[in-house]
Image: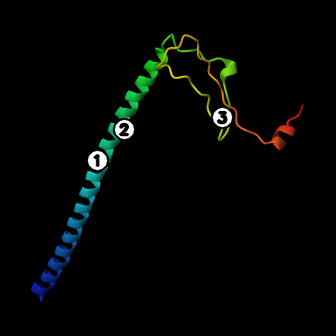
Amino acid sequence: GQHESCKSVLCKIQHEVVLVHDLLNTMEAEVKQQEKLKDLLKEIQKAAEKDQKEAQHLLEHIPPYLPKPTQNCITVKHEGQPKAVEPKPAQKHSKETKVIKEAALITAEEFESVPA
């Protein structure tokens, strides 16, 4: 009788050991996945810090030949509004090229609805 009860207890213990073993394997896989994720996040953080330093450097070292922003140059973008046509600096002309801005087309009805 005592041999049978010991055998039954050993079977239960063996079953629980198998369950614990499976749980440990699952946890180990989860830890490995978390470590990979952590490494990826560190890479992303390094790239973001590099980009931020580069942006800060550009902000602090704006070339003097670039035009300065002015109040009247601030535009509000409307959906579908074409952008200004920029001249291509590849060719040098004797005359100075001017930027010609394009305007969105409107219908006659829209034009008539504009207050005088």
Residue type for callout 1: Lys
User: In the image, what residue occupies the spot 57% across and 15% down?
Assistant: 67
The answer to whether residue 96 is left or right of residue 25 is right
For the N terminus, give its image quadrant.
bottom left
On the image, numbered disc 1 is attached to which residue? 36
Residue type for callout 2: Ile
Residue 37 to residue 103: above or below: below
Assign a secondary structure to mark 3: loop
Q: Nearer the viewer, residue 60 or 22?
A: 60
Q: Nearer the viewer, mark 3 or mark 2?
A: 3
Q: Nearer the viewer, mark 2 or mark 1?
A: 2
How many numbered marks appear? 3
Q: Nearer the viewer, mark 3 or mark 1?
A: 3
Residues tagged 2 and 1 counted as in contact (Cβ below 8 A) = no
User: In the image, what residue occupies the spot 24% across and 56% down?
Assistant: 28
Image coordinates for residue 53, horizontal then vertical, percent: 41, 24
Assign a secondary structure to mark 1: helix
For the C terminus, give its image quadrant.
top right
Between the C-alphas of marks 2 and 1, the distance is 12 Å
Residue 10's disc number: none
Local crowd size for mark 1, using a 10 Å CA cut-off: few (<14), some (14–19), many (≥20): few
On the image, numbered disc 2 is attached to which residue? 44
| Res 15 quadrant in image | bottom left
Image coordinates for residue 51, horizontal then vertical, percent: 41, 29
| Res 69 quadrant in image | top right
Assign a secondary structure to mark 2: helix
Between the C-alphas of marks 3 and 2, the distance is 32 Å
On the image, numbered disc 3 is attached to which residue? 77
Mark found first going from the N terminus, 3 or 1: 1
User: In the image, what residue occupies the spot 19% across and 69% down?
Assistant: 17
